[in-house]
């Protein structure tokens, strides 16, 4: 790859350090890359904020290529090596910390969008608070319970049903025996007939809370079935049924309350379970990838080969 076409014009001087616009460099070259290089470029675009902390090995494993391929790709972009790229990228990433303030300024200048300024701040604050839940002891206990249970049942109601389905389908890539209960029978028989010592239920619900959800929670409590509830902060109803309650801020002053923080909590919960399971989660992910390939469910690419 010639340095004459490597996006050098996307570099500018910042004081005594040179910052780069890696996104501009990669996107300008994307059509010229080989398939493996395109996978590398896509991974770097998705990981720009964390790329300064990656190694050649971690990138290679994530994309499914050799470290040599990573090194050649980086040099082809015009950098001496991966360390050179990361050193220059750190300058760019640090300066992007002020992007949120830039967005705020834009909202102030766009008439009716001005009202979204406070909504954005509330949304970002809700995400930060969702991440803060992962530092608590109760979070660690819940993640351990999710990792150890033989079977995990997931339920959601009304507007929260989609979040629950997404959580169940993605948790299944980290561990087996995850079942989304659609309650077609109207009895929640799959859960009620399960062994409380070998099972766990994850319930996702938001205001106005589903009457069926309250009744199910009451039944599970009487059965001593472990229950994790992910909900909002409009009331603290869930604590009457379980210690494992994770409340997220959803009120961001938009027409509908936002589910972004709930989604963050559920995604972080999957990550915590995968971390607990370690190699078992990686083997399960590989098995699911093979099944996806067998049934032709997914378009090919680096995602299904990830092992990180």
Image (tube, rainbow, N blue to C red):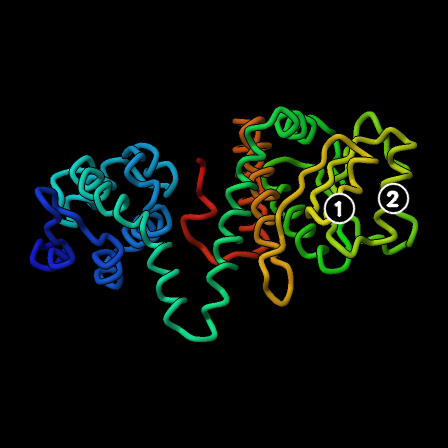
* Identity of the residue drawn at 73% across and 36% down: 228
Above or below residue 61? Residue 42 is below
Q: Position of residue 220 (x, y in %)?
A: 87, 36
Q: Quadrant of residue 296?
A: bottom right
Above or below residue 277? Residue 182 is below
Q: Are marks 1 and 2 in contact (CB under 8 Å)?
A: no
Q: Position of residue 89 (x, y in %)?
A: 22, 44
Q: Position of residue 134 (x, y in %)?
A: 56, 32
Q: Nearer the viewer, residue 132 or 31?
A: 132
* Identity of the residue drawn at 57% across and 26% down: 276
Q: Which mark is residue 171?
A: none
Circle 2 crowding by C-alpha within 10 Å: few under 14, some 14–19, many from 20 = some
Dot 1 or dot 2, earlier in sequence: 2
Give the total number of marks visible in the rendering. 2
Q: Which mark is residue 235?
A: 1
Q: Position of residue 14 (x, y in %)?
A: 13, 48
- Give the alpha-carbon distance from disc 1 to disc 2, as whole Å: 18 Å
Q: Secondary structure at mark 2?
A: helix
Q: Quadrant of residue 74?
A: top left
Left or right of residue 10, residue 162 in this image: right
Q: Nearer the viewer, residue 36 or 293?
A: 36
Tag 2 residue: 216
Instruction: Name the quadrant of the C terminus.
Output: top left
Q: Quadrant of residue 79?
A: top left
Q: Nearer the viewer, residue 70 or 219?
A: 219
Above or below residue 267? Residue 7 is below
């Amino acid at each position: 790859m010639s340095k004459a076409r490597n996006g050098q014009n996307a570099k500018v001087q910042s004081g005594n350090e040179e910052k780069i616009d890696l996104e501009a460099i990669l996107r300008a070259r994307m059509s010229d890359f080989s398939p493996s290089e395109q996978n590398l470029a896509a991974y770097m675009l998705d990981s720009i904020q964390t790329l300064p902390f990656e190694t050649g090995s971690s990138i290679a494993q994530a994309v499914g290529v050799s470290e040599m391929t990573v090194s050649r790709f980086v040099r082809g972009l015009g950098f001496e090596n991966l360390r050179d790229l990361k050193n220059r990228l750190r300058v760019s990433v640090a300066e992007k910390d002020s992007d949120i303030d830039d967005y705020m300024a834009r909202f102030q200048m766009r008439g009716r969008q001005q009202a979204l300024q406070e909504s954005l701040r509330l949304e970002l604050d809700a995400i930060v608070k969702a991440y803060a839940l992962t530092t608590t002891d109760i979070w660690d206990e819940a993640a351990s319970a999710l990792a150890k249970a033989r079977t995990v049942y997931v339920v959601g109601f009304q507007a929260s049903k989609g979040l629950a389905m997404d959580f169940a389908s993605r948790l299944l890539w980290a561990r087996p025996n995850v079942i989304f209960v659609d309650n077609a029978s109207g009895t929640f028989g799959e859960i009620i007939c399960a062994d409380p010592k070998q099972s766990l239920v994850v319930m996702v619900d938001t205001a106005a809370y589903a009457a069926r959800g309250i009744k199910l929670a009451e039944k599970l409590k009487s059965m001593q079935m472990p229950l994790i509830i992910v909900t909002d902060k409009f009331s603290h109803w869930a604590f009457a049924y379980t210690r494992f309650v994770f409340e997220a801020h959803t009120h961001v002053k938009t027409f509908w309350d936002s589910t972004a923080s709930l989604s963050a909590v559920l995604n972080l919960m999957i990550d915590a379970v995968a971390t607990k399971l370690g190699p078992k989660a990686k083997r399960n992910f590989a098995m699911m990838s093979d099944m996806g390939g067998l049934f032709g469910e997914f378009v090919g690419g680096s995602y299904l080969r990830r092992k990180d």
